[in-house]
Image (cartoon, helix red, strand yellow):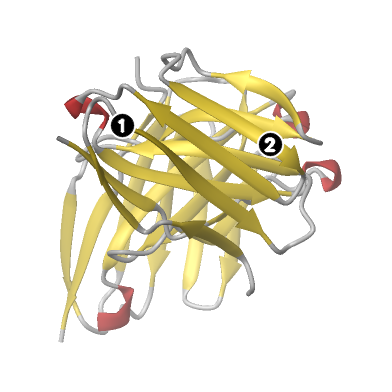
Amino acid sequence: ETGVTQTPRHLVMGMTNKKSLKCEQHLGHNAMYWYKQSAKKPLELMFVYNFKEQTENNSVPSRFSPECPNSSHLFLHLHTLQPEDSALYLCASSQVERGALEQYFGPGTRLTVT
Amino acid sequence: DQQVKQNSPSLSVQEGRISILNCDYTNSMFDYFLWYKKYPAEGPTFLISISSIKDKNEDGRFTVFLNKSAKHLSLHIVPSQPGDSAVYFCAASAHGSSNTGKLIFGQGTTLQVKP
């Protein structure tokens, strides 16, 4: 595997379900990100992890819970979601020490909440 | 309040001609700008970037121009090819973001290049 991978690619869940999204980066980066992309809206940054420490939480509801066990893996735990949470969830990684700000994205998980 | 704006939701261009995608920003602290391309069912792919110390950066068919006084940047693609058809996102970063890598994205412009 190369780059940034995300599983599952598609997920349909009910409002009472609990599920998790997984992201893995194979680039040796030290920062990982979760974004939400809703139709016709900009990518919204949700969480940032640097060196496994959460450095940013963009006022995300507590029904979204991130976990970063190491610098290569990032999870987004979902519980009691709402239909308006249906969106494309993108994971990205970057190497922030070099000052380069290019982020490399995974293919995303298309989430539908019914 | 949207700090990075792409006011044209879509653009259609004939193959071989120039495509010009525009982006405006409001935060004068932004000092690094990036363009990403996104195909359906894929994540965004980094295309080209520019630092605020420059006003132009070129990479093959892609050139990004930065006008700091107008808080405006543009991406030029010439010649345009049908494979360039995608959604293009502009993104910006401010001083102090080098530790978090935080980027602010525009809402995207869908480019269609017609054969």
Q: Is residue B81 visible?
A: no
Left/right of residue B42 with respect to residue A7 in the rendered view: left
- Residue A5 locus on image (x, y percent): 54, 62
Which image quadrant for residue B93?
A: top right
Q: Which mark is residue A17?
A: 1
Q: What is the quadrant of the N terminus of chain B in the image?
A: top left
> Does residue A101 appear to the left or right of A87 in the view shown?
right
**Percent from the top left, x then y, of residue B6?**
30, 39
Residue at label 2?
A68
Q: Residue at x 26, y 25 (%)?
A: A16
Secondary structure of the residue carrying tag 1 is loop
- The amino acid sitting under disc 1 is Asn
Check chain identity for marks 2 and 1: say if they share one.
yes
Where the C terminus of chain B falls, by quadrant?
bottom left
**CA gap, disc 2 and disc 1:** 22 Å
Q: Farthest front residue?
A: A17
Tell me what residue is drawn at x 23 percent, y 26 percent.
A15
Toward the viewer: B15 or A113? A113
Which comes before the other along the chain, label 2 or label 1? Answer: 1
- Chain bearing tag 1 is A
Q: Which mark is residue B33?
A: none
Please count the marks in the image.
2
Chain ID, mark 2:
A
Q: Amino acid at mark 2?
A: Cys
Q: Report the mark closest to the observer, 2 or 1.
A: 1
Residue reaching furthest to the right: A97
Residue B104 in the image, given as x and y percentages of width and height = 49, 32
Q: Position of residue A7 (x, y in %)?
A: 46, 57
Q: Please say if B102 is above or below A71.
A: above
